[in-house]
């Protein structure tokens, strides 16, 4: 057995004058010094997905929530294939203060605002802020366009049509 968390729970005792008597629960670990992260793609049927797991780790680290964004699926229309649209709320940024690039299969959006030294603020509730938001792109994803309108930056991505490939592997006979 790899290790088990054992947890014993005692019945709640009545609260007297704001104090509890005795512990409510006691937890202990058997066989572990520290918790270890179990890889999410650790199934023996998922071979060669190490790069995907590293990409998932990169995405989950460092996401501070700014700027907020939406991701929506846009259905196929006429001859235009199905697309994904990422919309970021970038109020206060101009087109010149925003950069949209693709770097090593990652869509990177950067915003840079400069402090206006000539202004004298009596109260400053809106700070000049910089950000970088990164999205990991699947192989074959194409960035079609980026549009800034009413403080919303919309980026359209083409979703590739998956090819179904069946390859027959010959079996050699060794007698």
Image (cartoon, helix red, strand yellow):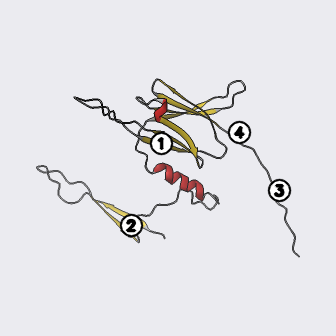
Residue placed farthest to the left in the image?
17
How far is mark 4 from mark 2, CA to CA?
A: 44 Å
Q: Earlier in the sequence, mark 2 or mark 1?
A: 2
Percent coordinates x, y for residue 45 in the rendering: 64, 59
Which numbered disc, 3 or 1, marks the residue closer to the eye?
Answer: 1
Name the front one of labels 2 and 1: 1
Which residue is the site of mark 4?
Answer: 161
Q: How busy is the neighbourhood of tag 3: few (under 14 within 10 Å), some, or many (20 plus)? A: few
| Placement of the C terminus among the 4 image quadrants | bottom right
Which class describes the residues within 10 Å of circle 2: few (<14), some (14-19), or many (20+)? few
Nearest the eye: 157 or 9 = 157
Question: Local crowd at mark 4 within 10 Å, few (<14), some, or many (≥20)?
Answer: few
Which residue position is annotated with label 1?
133
Mark 2 lies on a secondary structure that is loop
Location of residue 130 in the rendering, given as x and y in whole percent from the top left corner: 40, 40
Q: CA distance from mark 3 to mark 1?
A: 42 Å
Instruction: Look at the numbered disc 3 and give the secondary structure of its residue.
Output: loop
Which SS class for mark 4? loop
Disc 4 to disc 3, C-alpha distance = 22 Å
x and y, in percent, of residue 126 in the image: 32, 32
Judged by depth in the image, the label closer to the viewer, 4 or 1, is 1
Left or right position of 172 against 110: right
Is 167 placed above or below 33 here?
above
Residue beneath the point at 79% across and 50% down: 166
Occupied quadrant, residue 8: bottom left
- Eyeballing the image, is 88 above or below 103? above
């Amino acid at each position: 057995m790899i290790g088990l968390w054992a947890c014993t729970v005692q019945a709640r005792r009545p609260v007297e004058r704001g104090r509890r008597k005795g512990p409510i629960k006691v937890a202990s670990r058997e066989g572990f010094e520290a918790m270890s992260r179990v890889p999410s793609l650790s199934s023996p049927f998922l071979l060669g997905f190490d790069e995907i797991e590293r990409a998932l780790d990169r995405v989950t680290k460092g996401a501070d929530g700014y700027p907020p964004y939406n991701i929506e699926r846009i259905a196929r229309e006429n001859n235009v294939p199905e697309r994904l649209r990422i919309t970021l709320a970038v109020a206060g940024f101009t087109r010149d203060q925003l950069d949209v690039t693709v770097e090593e299969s990652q869509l990177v959006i950067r915003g840079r605002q400069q402090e206006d030294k000539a202004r004298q603020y009596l109260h400053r509730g809106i700070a000049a802020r910089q950000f970088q938001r990164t999205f990991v792109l699947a192989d074959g994803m194409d960035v079609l366009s980026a549009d800034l309108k009413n403080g919303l930056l919309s980026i359209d991505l083409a979703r590739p049509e998956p090819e179904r490939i069946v390859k027959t592997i010959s079996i050699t006979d060794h007698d």
